[in-house]
């Protein structure tokens, strides 16, 4: 008997992204149906790790986490339709945000994660990083 590895919420989200990329003509409903078909019968994701870490760099937390309560409910009731529906909400919110505003950190000072820390980082790097490493990093950064 082959034991299927337990997927995390982030794994399922990445799969939804891959399906959207591979089948750009599919609706969100078609992606949801494909997720349900693919993951049904498998172990449900753990509740202790209910997050999609890489999404923090793509959209504000309130957007990419919009579907996580539905995912949680789906896991608690062991309902793959609910899990997939929540994942699709997260995916749709993120894609809509990027379509409307561009990638995170490229719009304005409010969304730029480096505002307010650039000077402190430069000071810290200048103080603690040896000059030869600093020169190496600058050369690599210019390439």
Image: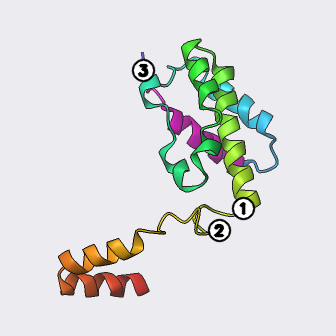
Q: Which mark is residue 101?
A: 1
- Residues in magenta, as a range: 5-20
Labels 1 and 3: the sequence-earlier one: 3
Q: Tell me: 31 left or right of 115.
A: right
Labels 2 and 3: the sequence-earlier one: 3
Q: CA distance from mark 2 to mark 1?
A: 7 Å
Quadrant (top left, top right, bottom left, bottom right) of the C terminus: bottom left
- Where 36 falls versus 25 (above or below)? above
One can see residue 46 in this view: no
- Where 4 falls versus 24 (above or below)? above
Question: What residue is disc 3 on?
Answer: 3
Identify the residue at the far top of this view.
Answer: 77
Q: Tell me: 66 left or right of 119.
A: right
Quadrant (top left, top right, bottom left, bottom right) of the N terminus: top left
Q: Tell me: 108 left or right of 135.
A: right
> Residue placed at 58% from the left, 13% from the top?
78
- 17 magenta-colored: yes
The mark lying in front, picked from 1 and 3, is 1
Q: Name the secondary structure under disc 1.
A: helix
Task: State the image coordinates of residue 77 (x, y, percent, origin top left).
Answer: 59, 11
Task: State the image coordinates of residue 14 (x, y, percent, origin top left).
Answer: 57, 43
- Identify the image quadrant of residue 92: top right
**Nearer-the-camera pick, 23 or 66:** 66
Q: Which mark is residue 107?
A: 2
**Nearer-the-camera pick, 96 or 21:** 96
Task: State the image coordinates of residue 17 (x, y, percent, origin top left).
Answer: 64, 46
């Amino acid at each position: 008997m082959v034991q299927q590895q337990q997927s995390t919420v982030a794994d399922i989200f990445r799969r939804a992204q891959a399906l959207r990329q591979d089948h750009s003509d599919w609706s969100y409903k078609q992606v949801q149906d494909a997720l349900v078909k693919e993951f049904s019968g498998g172990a449900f994701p753990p509740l202790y790790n209910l997050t999609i870490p890489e999404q923090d760099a793509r959209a504000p937390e309130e957007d990419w986490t919009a579907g996580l309560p539905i995912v949680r409910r789906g896991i608690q009731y062991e309902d793959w339709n609910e899990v997939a529906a929540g994942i699709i909400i997260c995916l749709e919110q993120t894609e809509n945000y990027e379509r409307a505003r561009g990638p995170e950190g490229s719009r304005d000072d409010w969304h730029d994660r480096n505002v307010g820390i650039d000077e402190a980082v430069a000071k810290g790097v200048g103080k603690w990083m040896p000059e030869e490493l600093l020169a190496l990093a600058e050369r690599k950064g210019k390439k």
